[in-house]
Image: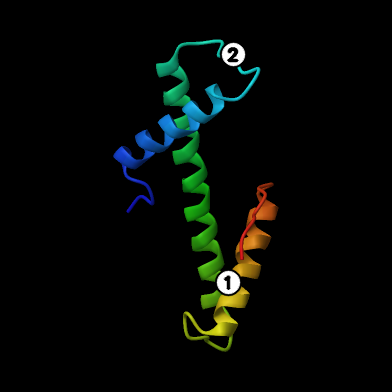
Amino acid sequence: MPLLSDDKATHLSHVILDSLLGAPGVTPKTDRESILREVKRILHAELHVEEEVDSAARKKLASLSRQLPEGSPEWEVRYQAYFREEMNRRGRLFIGA
């Protein structure tokens, strides 16, 4: 199941574009619809990466010799560490808890 519905992605792409166009010194080099499509494509691509990273982190947790209950404090700490490690491995900046 996608993390972001098409309607939400469309809305968010409009919010992002409006914010960018409202910034001083920003002049678009193409039409609004092309920019919206690209913003939406980037949103979906980045969310896909996060889904893959989440899956990799969960796989590492499942492979531990001592199984940790999901949601436990130790599971959360290890999940965040594995998630951050996988994001770094992919060259992505992760800003999280």
Q: Residue 18 location in percent, x, y?
A: 47, 27
Kind of residue indicated by mark 2 = Thr
Query: Tag 2, which secondary structure?
Result: loop
Question: Neighbour class for label 2 at 10 Å: few (<14), some, many (≥20)?
Answer: few
Residue at horizontal 40%, vertical 18%?
33
Quickly name the residue at label 1: 79
Q: Residue 66 location in percent, x, y?
A: 57, 89
Look at the picture and state if 14 lies above or below 72. Answer: above
Question: Neighbour class for label 1 at 10 Å: few (<14), some, many (≥20)?
Answer: many
Query: Tag 1, which secondary structure?
Result: helix
Q: Nearer the viewer, residue 45 or 61?
A: 45
User: Could you tell which of marks 1 and 2 lies nearer the N-terminus?
Assistant: 2
Q: How far, Cα to Cα, is label 1 from label 2?
A: 41 Å
Describe residue 41's horizontal placement relative to residue 20 as left or right: left
Quickly name the residue at label 2: 27
Q: Nearer the viewer, residue 11 or 67?
A: 11
Kind of residue indicated by mark 1 = Tyr
Quadrant of the image occupied by residue 85: bottom right
Residue at horizontal 48%, vertical 86%?
69
Look at the picture and state if 69 lies above or below 48. Answer: below
Look at the picture and state if 77 lies above or below 83. Answer: below
Quarter of the picture holding the N terminus: bottom left
Q: How many marks?
A: 2
Describe residue 94's horizontal placement relative to residue 67 as left or right: right
Q: Residue 89 location in percent, x, y?
A: 69, 53
